[in-house]
Image (cartoon, rainbow, N blue to C red):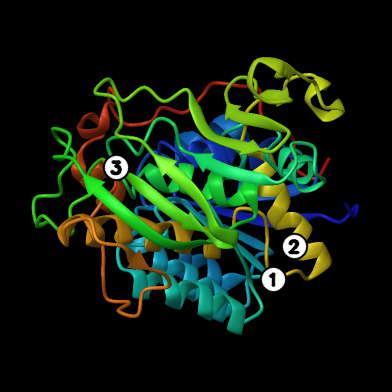
Amino acid sequence: MSERRYRVAIVGGAGMWGKLYLRAAAEHEQIDPILVDSSPRRDEFARSLGISEVFESLDDLLAQEIPDVVCNILPVGVAHRLVEQCARAGVRAISCEKPIAVELETADRMVDVCREHGAALGCATAHWEVPFLHETAAWIAAGNIGDITTVAIPGGLPVEVSGAGCVQLTIMRGVTGLDVEWVEGFTLPPVQGYRAPEADDLTMDCPAYGRMGLAGGIICEVPQPATDHHVRCRVSVTGTAGQVFLQGPQNVYLAGTGAAASPVWPEFAQEEGRRWSMAPMLQRLLDAVDSGALEVPCSGDDYRKALEIAIAFKLSAANGNQRVSLPLTDRSHKILPHPYRRLGGDVAGYDSIGYEGPPVAEQRTPRTQGQ
């Protein structure tokens, strides 16, 4: 990484998820953080982290300067407009949160606009929600479990096939390097409180299961989720000579098959456990600024494909569980996520998704900017 300084704006930094990005930016020694938020909480958050540059809107910020990086940590119902606005304004690296969009055609446009204007687009945190995903993917690709024979999402897609299920779908694609070619899906009734009021049976977010056909003829099984919605293992990958279980706080790596299988510890997995934070998500955007790369790990394209897969589960379930081939020709399909994800906690209510109330600024010793 270069020794340059980076101008990084966190839009929605006084929100429940945005405050984590804001803290990571404030703690980074090479970042000059900018807080953009319309909430009256913004001043308290800025004071708590020693952030002196605060804007009420993205329009106000872009009228004054074009930062290196903008993280749009906003509800899915509005984030797409700001992502496109940043790309057209010349922001070099941009991120948003999950799910990437409501409509598939909106996700298409976000990815296309960013690529057209030379902006790297990252989305959400799936690649860091299990330990060592990138190292594990390289280890599997190097043949350490032989040829991949089957893949599974053992806990199914509980609660939300799109809103939270996009994480497991993205992890699966990330660790195997395989795209999904078809889906045979089933759905369950929506979990209480998670159905968007205006959603019909086809567009509501809900639990899902079934199977996916991956490139190379590999099948990914997605069992019916348990009623307690607890998912320990996010993704398992089975090969001719071993198996991997991606899960927190520690992955499981097995060499051999059947009764002869035994645990192994790849060198990277022996490292001290990494503290989960937003720092790696920010770092991939800084690296893109330095390198000029248009694609970043855990990208907008990754989450666009996760949304498409989720929609395919819904379409298959609605048509007698028939196989749905990807990519989808009709890009107008959509899934309406939980109101909190689409509208934000200040509108839908933080208690609607299990929080006790609005986010509170941490009281901590601020870092002096420019050090």
Q: What is the crowding at mark 1: few (fewer than 14 residues within 10 Å), some, or many (at least 20)? A: some
x then y, percent, for residue 41: 39, 38
Q: Which residue is mark 1?
A: 294
| Left or right relative to 305: residue 345 | left
Name which quarter of the figure residue 158 lies in. top left
Label located before the other in sequence (2 or 1)? 2
CA gap, disc 2 to disc 1?
7 Å
Label located before the other in sequence (3 or 1)? 3
Residue at the extreme bottom: 116
Choose mark 3 or mark 1, whichever is in front: 3
Residue at 45% of width from left, 70% of height from top? Answer: 59
Residue at 59% of width from left, 31% of height from top? Answer: 246
Q: Secondary structure at mark 1?
A: loop
Q: What is the crowding at mark 2: few (fewer than 14 residues within 10 Å), some, or many (at least 20)? A: many
Q: Which residue is mark 2?
A: 288
Give the residue type that dot 1 points to: Leu
Give the residue type that dot 2 points to: Ala
x then y, percent, for residue 185: 28, 52
Determine which of the numbered discs, if any, sits on residue 160 in the image: 3
* Nearer to us in this view, 148 or 154: 148
CA gap, disc 3 to disc 1?
30 Å
Choose mark 3 or mark 2, whichever is in front: 3
> Can the viewer see residue 5 in this picture?
yes
